[in-house]
Amino acid sequence: MRARQESCCFTGHRAAKLPWKYDESDLRCLALKRRIMDAVELAYEQGYRHFLCGMAQGCDLYFCECVLALRERCPDVTLEAAIPCPTQAETWPAVQRERYQKLVSACDFETLVSAAYSASCMQRRDRYMVDHASLLIAAFDGSSGGTRYTVEYALKRGVSIVDIPIL
């Protein structure tokens, strides 16, 4: 794995919290994916080579797919799946579970943050990512929840933040 100074992590809302929910053909979703890709490419241009993803439904998986697309063009890119617990995708719809498994398999590294689900395993995963990066890309609308927790934790840790508007 790479040094913290060339590592970038991501946080963003889950699909259920997005205005278009799970409809990834929605023009607003397509525009958000483009903004995420632009932020990933800019991070690469600034010297970031290692990317950490929390692998949640919604924005995390969009980010993961953007980094994998970048890695196709730039083989020095590495991607780490920061998995909060072994059962993360267990209750997801079958299509989303398959997508998750495919993406985890495509990652260069897989870090299991907690051996079992707990009330705090998601926050532990978020802290792990921030603690191992010097840049956080955030698709965030200001609402409370895990994305807000991660942004606030990054601010406390002095990690740079690139804010991507949801709409």
Image: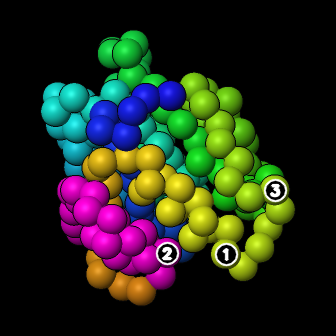
The crowding category of the residue bearing disc 2, from other C-alpha atoms within 10 Å (few below 14, some 14 to 19, many at least 20), is some
Q: What's the CA distance linking mark 3 and mark 2?
A: 20 Å
Q: Position of residue 17 (x, y in %)?
A: 47, 76
Q: What's the CA distance linking mark 2 and mark 1?
A: 11 Å
Residue highlighted by disc 1: 120
Q: Which mark is residue 115?
A: 3
Q: Number of callouts in the render?
A: 3
Residue highlighted by disc 2: 146
Q: Which residues are magenta?
A: 145-167
- In this view, 98 is above or below 72: below
Which of disc 2 and disc 3 is earlier in sequence? 3
Tell me the kind of residue under disc 1. Answer: Ser
The crowding category of the residue bearing disc 1, from other C-alpha atoms within 10 Å (few below 14, some 14 to 19, many at least 20), is few
Which of disc 1 and disc 2 is earlier in sequence? 1
Q: What's the CA distance linking mark 1 and mark 3?
A: 12 Å
Tell me the kind of residue under disc 3. Answer: Ala
Q: Position of residue 113 (x, y in %)?
A: 68, 54
Check residue 74 for magenta coloring.
Answer: no
Q: Secondary structure at mark 3?
A: loop
* Quadrant of residue 118 within the rendered picture: bottom right
Q: Residue at x 54, y 37 (%)?
A: 80
Q: Is residue 148 left or right of residue 56?
A: left
